[in-house]
Amino acid sequence: MSEHHYTHGYSAAVMAGHRRRTAENSAAHLVPHLRSGDRLLDLGSGAGTITADLARIVGPENLTAVEVAEEAAALTRGELAAQGIEGSEVVLADGSALPFADDTFDVVHAHQVLQHVADPVGVLREARRVTRPGGIIAIRDSDYGGFRWFPQSEVLDHWLACYLDAACRNGGSPDAGRRLLSWARAAGFEDITVSSSTWCYATEEEKEAWAITWSGRLRDGALADSLQRHGLMGPEDREQAARAFEQWARQPDGWFSVLHGEILARA
């Protein structure tokens, strides 16, 4: 997107977490409304796992994915190929200036996108422009301020405060989930269905996966660089936080809940 700075980057640790996302666990608010033949734009397709699921529902030839960076677009193409999805198009474009005519799509989907853009209202207006009258714009974004975990950890409290600061300094809105309704109204939408949902990590496998993705992000990659560049967490602080995630994952009663806001807006 314009003035784009993706706080997490595309490291192996980030992708390990992103590839666990599916339409079932990340787009359940949209799936019941999809039909075969719907022309669907997946805005900010990233790892491509949700994209592949959506393509199977509407038909691969009806799905277009958009990414702002070639590195991310290549990840989407690779995942679609790995899952045997043929016929979908992956386009390099800016979400605030989409290269599509008015009323091109029946559905626009974006997952974990608006929290990272400088002008989320502008992106929503553009999504509305390329969606036919009566079509659906489906958005889901996390709300970091609503993250909760057990056992409590002062180190993880510090990690979250530093992440919130870094994401804001990078031009994002890490509390995007709670803002989706207001952004949609500012973009001119009137018919809006609002919901929220969570990811919950409590099994041994889930906890290990969550700890791996976050400890990896803290040790190396774009997030580590942002925390360092902004003077928020040096190497020792980041390593302490990475170990805190790993220690949390080993707790038999460990629990982590990730809050998301969701909207379905009619064009």
Image: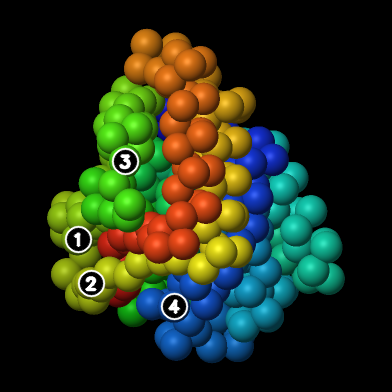
Q: Which of marks 4 and 3 is nearer the N terminus?
A: 4
* Dot in front, 4 or 1: 4
Mark earlier in primary sequence (2, 3): 3
Label 2 close to label 1 by CB (< 8 Å): yes
Mark toward the viewer: 4 or 3: 3
Q: Which three-letter amino acid code belongs to the residue tagged 1?
A: Leu
User: Is any part of residue 43 visible from this angle?
Assistant: no
Instruction: Give the residue at x 43% y 20%.
Output: 237
**Mark 1 and mark 4 in contact (Cβ < 8 Å)?**
no
Q: Nearer the viewer, residue 261 or 224?
A: 224
7 left or right of 142?
Answer: right
Vertical relation: 178 (above or below) 154:
below
Q: Where is residue 141 in the image (x, y as percent from the top left)?
A: 36, 56
Relative to 137, residue 43 above or below: above
Compared across the picture, whether 229 is left or right of 261 comes to right
4 or 1: tag closer to the N-terminus: 4
Q: Please give the label number shown on residue 194.
A: 2
Residue visible at 83% across and 63% down in the picture: 82
Residue type marked 2:
Val
Q: Residue 153 carries which label?
A: 3
Which image quadrant is residue 140 in?
bottom left
Q: What residue type is labelled 3?
A: Ser
